[in-house]
Amino acid sequence: MTPGRSILRGSVQYLKGVGPRRAERFAKLDVYTGRDLLYHLPYRYEDATTVDAISELKVGRDATVIGRVVSKGVIPTRRRLRVFRAVIRDVSGHIECAWPGRPWLDRTIHKGDLLLASGPVRFYHGRQLQPREYTVLARTSDEGDASGDGTAAGSPRWGERPAEGSAASGARPAAGRVFPVYPATEGLTHRQIRAVIHLNLPRLLSDLGDEDPIPGGWRKELSLPPLAEALRTLHRPSAVAQVERCRRRLAFEELFFLQLLHARARARLRHEVRGIVFNAPATLTRSLLRALPFRLTTAQRRVWSEIAADMARPAPMNRLLQGDVGSGKTVVAALAMLKAIEAGHQAAIMAPTELLAEQHRRTFEKLLDPLGVEPVLLTGSVTGKARRRVVERIAAGDARLIVGTHALIQEGVDFASPGLVVIDEQHRFGVEQRRRLRESGEAPDALVMSATPIPRSLALVLYGDLDLSIIDELPPGRRPVRTAVRGPESRDAAFDFLGDQLAAGRQAYVIYPLVEESEALEARAATVMFERLQARFPDVAVRLLHGRLSSAEKDDAMRSFLAGDTSLLVATTVIEVGIDVPNATVMIIEDAERFGLAQLHQLRGRVGRGAEQSYCIVFHASETPSERLVAFEKKTDGFELAEEDLRIRGQGDLFGKEQHGTALPRFAQLDRDIDLLEAARRRARAIVDADPGLSKPAHRRFRHELDLRYARREALYRVG
Ligand code: ADP
Ligand code: MG
């Protein structure tokens, strides 16, 4: 180690007990420097303060025990399953622990070890504990290396439990009876990591000193401990109860710097490009409000005023409008478009498909007819002379409200004076398209609409560079869709019910899930069903829609359903997200486990759009419905379902591979830390608004810390 150089910044290689070979393995855990090691925190703790006395264990209950291994061995059973067993003893008695199918533990757990084990107590020739979790707390002869053990590979985050118990031993931490469990990797066990941290913690902490990227005043307000205290406690808590407050300290730090990064991206856009100040008298917008046959809901009024205020500012608007299906986003979008138009600019709305674009055109026609604003359509099927005329009108500026698809951002389409671009169903558009739109023309305002509710916390992390408006209220008088989750035995009754609805003149969907492995398989399943339903309802017009059809055939089936010529549509999920058929009252979903909650909710949103009561019947193939389906049956609010989804799946899953562009929080738990997230965002934005370059003396440390974090974890904004 270079003398005088901070061990925090130096390579982890030079720390006690590491060396070049282990340093390579630490690199797999993203630990490169001393500071990284300090931030390599346990993801859970074994709490030995709540152990049970062995003599008091009851069959059928879960228990946690600590005892010495008095005998052990691998016993083959008649079923050729090899079972590792160890008898452990505490002051009150002894019990056999058994690990079926895990004979290799014989090399990890030794006679004389002090073992912590927890799991269910079963009856098998007497009481037997079958540990789900176990840890070697201490070893009499402590040179045996517990490598090759069941320590979880990879780096689990907070609260995620590894599938296997972690076989770890090592010196008992002096701080008490709470044992940290660290993320480990191949060739570097949890126990070795614990030992390395144990050896180096005092020096690392003394090097850190009072250094703290979070100002003391903020910590006080949020009741968070200083950094050094948080790190010390997380590595060596004397009670599990101390952990949460310290975890929140690191969660805040992490969220704050992530929000600072977002805020800077947002500021860059705002400073580099000048936007339009829309502040003309409210002629058209006021007329529309007067002409509407209903009053805006409170939520609609709130988001409309957010949008209007944003449009009146000189910086270009870059806003995400979220609202459940049917919450009335279209009216809000229309108001925003009129605001651009009344200021003498053009407004465009871009839909993901032609069908949806045409639907928008019809909606806007009806809505805006009394105002004398005529929507102009530009999609891929507008061709030849018609297209030339539309393109000319757009270029000349006399087309003021333009509805279209991707065709709007194609070469050769030039707007005379683009003021606002509304992007519908945002999740179908990539980051790249968003950027391209921003670059087209001068700097039009952008309003991105999404009908896929995601929890606010997730939105702030994923789309932190956008401003957020949420319509969290449905117009009054809506009848919620009645939802039933049923097993296969109810199929007949469900189709009888479907028949009644069809006979009453209603329309319906039967949905087959996409079969990822094979489009052919999926098409076949849907086709079989289609034929069966046709035979069952000979007088009903049934159509089939799946991914193997040509786009002309798909289009034709969809249009026929829209027009009411088809009553029953048997489809795979190629049916479109925003499609609006008020006469459709039944949605039947087959094999529903294959859908995510958001998808199910989207599908259910296809019905319940008219005056009649609507129904959604969901079939599960398994014996009992999953937790997800149970939630789906109980809740109809999209935001509540999204929160539930976050809880059931965990944030790791929600941040799946396709959700690039943002770093995963390591310490923050989005369903729990929303207060911290809001506080972090507020502060980050205030700082960047006042000092975009972070160049004021008080802010330099933030910039420094941002750089540190970038360097440490490659780039927080990793794309692709
Ligand atoms: P979204 O696009 O959010 O799914 P829409 O804008 O299509 O929802 O609105 C759904 C329906 O609700 C439309 O028929 C619309 O006219 C109607 N609607 C919108 N706002 C209100 C309101 N405040 N009161 C009553 N009906 C409304
Ligand atoms: Mg819509």
Image (cartoon, rainbow, N blue to C red):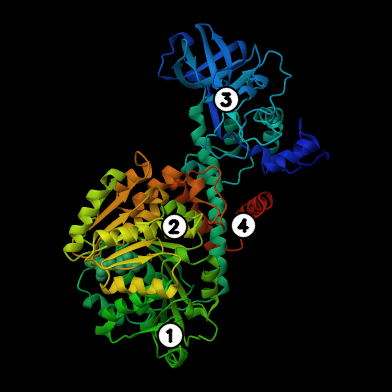
Q: Residue at x 55, y 34 (%)?
A: 162
Q: Earlier in the sequence, mark 1 or mark 2?
A: 1
Q: Earlier in the sequence, mark 2 or mark 3?
A: 3
Q: Nearer the viewer, residue 360 or 74?
A: 74
Give the Cα distance between marks 4 and 1: 38 Å
Q: Which residue position is annotated with label 1?
A: 382
Question: Which residue sits furthest right?
Answer: 2
State left or right for residue 113 relative to residue 572: right
Query: Which corner quadrant of the figure contains ligand 1?
Result: bottom left
* Rendered position, 661 above or below 215: below
Q: Residue at x 54, y 20 (%)?
A: 117
Q: Amino acid at mark 2?
A: Glu
Quadrant in which the C terminus is drawn: bottom right
Q: Which residue position is annotated with label 2?
A: 522
Can you tell which quarter of the image residue 394 is in?
A: bottom left
* Closer to viewer: mark 1 or mark 3: 3
Q: Nearer the viewer, residue 600 or 295?
A: 600
Q: Earlier in the sequence, mark 1 or mark 3?
A: 3
Image coords of residue 391 (percent x, y): 46, 89
Quadrant in which the N terminus is drawn: top right
Give the Cα distance between marks 2 and 4: 35 Å
State left or right for residue 585 relative to residue 190: left
Q: Which residue position is annotated with label 3?
A: 101
Q: Earlier in the sequence, mark 2 or mark 4?
A: 2
Question: Which residue sits furthest left?
Answer: 504
Callout 4: helix, strand or loop?
Answer: loop
Crowd band around label 1 with a 10 angstrom C-alpha radius: few (<14), some (14–19), many (20+) = some
Give the Cα distance between marks 1 and 3: 65 Å
Q: Which residue position is annotated with label 4?
A: 718
Q: Amino acid at mark 4?
A: Arg
